[in-house]
Amino acid sequence: MIYLIIGVPGAGKTYFAVNTIKNICEDKKDNKCKYKHVFTNINGLQYDKLNQIAKSQDFAQPFDFEDLKLHIVQEYNYHEQYKKNLIHCEDYDEFVKSQGVFQKYIGSCIFIDECHLYFESKATPELVRFLSYHRHFDIDLYLITQNKNLIDKKYLVFVEKMYKGLPSSKRFFSNVFRYEVYASYQEYKSNRIEIISLKAKKEIFDLYNSGSVQKGKSVLHKFLLPILLLSVLSYFVFDYFVQKDTVVNNDPVNQELPVKSDNEIKSPIKTDDKERSLFSISCIDYDCSFKDTNSYFSLDSILKLFEKFNCKEFLTDYGVPPKRTYIVECDSKMQNLIDLLITKQEFPNETDNNRPLLPNLNGKF
């Protein structure tokens, strides 16, 4: 298969690739791996550490595109001769393999970083042939680039799955990478399969040199946080004076006292004509709890809640690491589900840290 990994700097492209390579090495250690070797040109990759994980001396190896290209051109020339009946053989694939073409790459997985430097904006017939024929040699490819528009569409049409890393400004937590997964290189909404998350782990960063080790703040934190703090302060000041003014205007000398209903309910904050409420979540590492509750949820569970109820980050207090407090604006109905989960304990135990994992939310409300 051919996979494409895209995203702006800091979106987690290399992190995703190295995490995948590490998983492949672990499969190799457990004799579950279908690959003979892993090749990559990722800068600063610690091949010795990966081979220690794989318990092999040469399973993970540096990648040289020029060497691969020699095999690509050689196979292309053989195929041109074969089409002209200049080569006679019963099985073309076996003939090519007998000539040593792709010998070192057969049954391997290749990760090509900055692939736009090799698969340029103008396609060549040799590379097009290779992308259409690579499966005959049991080769899988991961192509990594910042922008797929730098690659000719004649190459992109062979992509079977694309991972798009989301920038930090579109992530709820800076220490969790998120990726949109598409069924091809096209970013149509109907073409999107799922959104996946990867927790940023030091053990992965230690396997390569990354510019993402220093987690950058989102645009919201960097530019809008002071404005949000001022807005929250203004809200409480305004609310205080409005309540004070209401007491004065309700002077019994001037008007009758209103009748207070026993069924009076405080309305949640409304935004864009939809009922929205603010929720406070405190997290220590990957364990989170809602304000005034003693039930802890995993970070994955919180993210599922955010997606289900269209939550938007309103304010973040980083506090003393590793503790953080988040204030998010969500559909008010989320409170009903939180109450249900806490009171009835309607959730199974999660395999990670034995924290509660949310059940299937479909049809709850």
Image (cartoon, grey):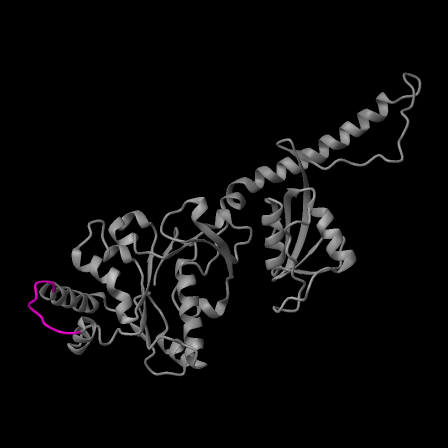
Outermost front residue: 90
Residue shown at 72% from the left, 30% from the top: 238
Q: Quadrant of residue 312?
A: top right
Q: x%, y% of residue 285? A: 61, 62
**Image quadrant where one finds the N terminus:** bottom left
Q: x%, y% of residue 93? A: 20, 72
Residue 291 visible in the current orientation: no
Q: x%, y% of residue 360? A: 64, 56
> Is residue 17 depicted above or below 181 in this figure?
below
Please provide the residue range marked out in magenta.
Answer: 83-90
Q: Nearer the viewer, residue 68 or 102?
A: 102
- Magenta residue check for 140: no
Outermost top residue: 254
Outermost left residue: 86
Q: Is residue 174 left or right of residue 137?
A: right
- Number of numbered markers: 0
Q: Quadrant of residue 63?
A: bottom left
Main secondary structure of the magenta stretch = loop
Q: Quadrant of residue 55?
A: bottom left
Residue shown at 50% from the left, 57% from the top: 196
Residue 330 visible in the current orientation: yes
Q: x%, y% of residue 71? A: 18, 69
